[in-house]
Amino acid sequence: MARLLMGDAEWAFFGLFIVAIRGSGGRPASNHRLVQDGIFWTARTDAQWCDLPEAFGKWSSVYRQFRCLTLAGLWEL
């Protein structure tokens, strides 16, 4: 699974957007990088959210973060 995780250079790029978009309200994500790795793992493997390995945290929490980032327009080109 390690080959599916972000490298430091990738995180340096994406991390700035993630932290900037993260809104207030609710409990803060404990590890933004781990959540982002979970989002990318799901996209790369084409797996269902509920099949996300527990190493990334609760699938529902990772999905909720994904949804928040989607609504903020992060994934638009």
Image: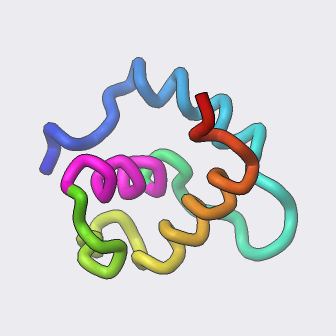
Q: Is residue 35 left or right of residue 71?
A: left
Q: Is residue 61 left or right of residue 43?
A: right
Q: Residue at x 46, y 49 (%)?
A: 36
Compared to 66, does 51 lie above or below? below
Residue 64 lies, in percent from the top left, at: 59, 71
Colour scheme in use: rainbow
**What is the magenta segment's predominant secondary structure?**
helix
Q: Residue at x 65, y 52 (%)?
A: 69
Quadrant housing residue 26 = bottom right
Q: Quadrant of the C terminus?
A: top right
Residue 51 lies, in percent from the top left, at: 24, 76
Q: Closer to the camera, 8 or 75?
A: 75
Quadrant housing residue 5 = top left
Q: Is residue 42 magenta?
A: yes
Q: Is residue 30 left or right of residue 45?
A: right
Compared to 62, does 16 lie above or below? above
The magenta segment = 35-45
Which residue appears farthest toward the front when viewing the image?
77
Quadrant housing residue 50 = bottom left
Compared to 72, does 62 lie above or below? below
Residue 25 lies, in percent from the top left, at: 85, 70
Q: Is residue 7 magenta?
A: no
Residue 31 lies, in percent from the top left, at: 53, 55
Q: Residue at x 41, y 54 (%)?
A: 39
Question: Number of numbered discs present?
Answer: 0
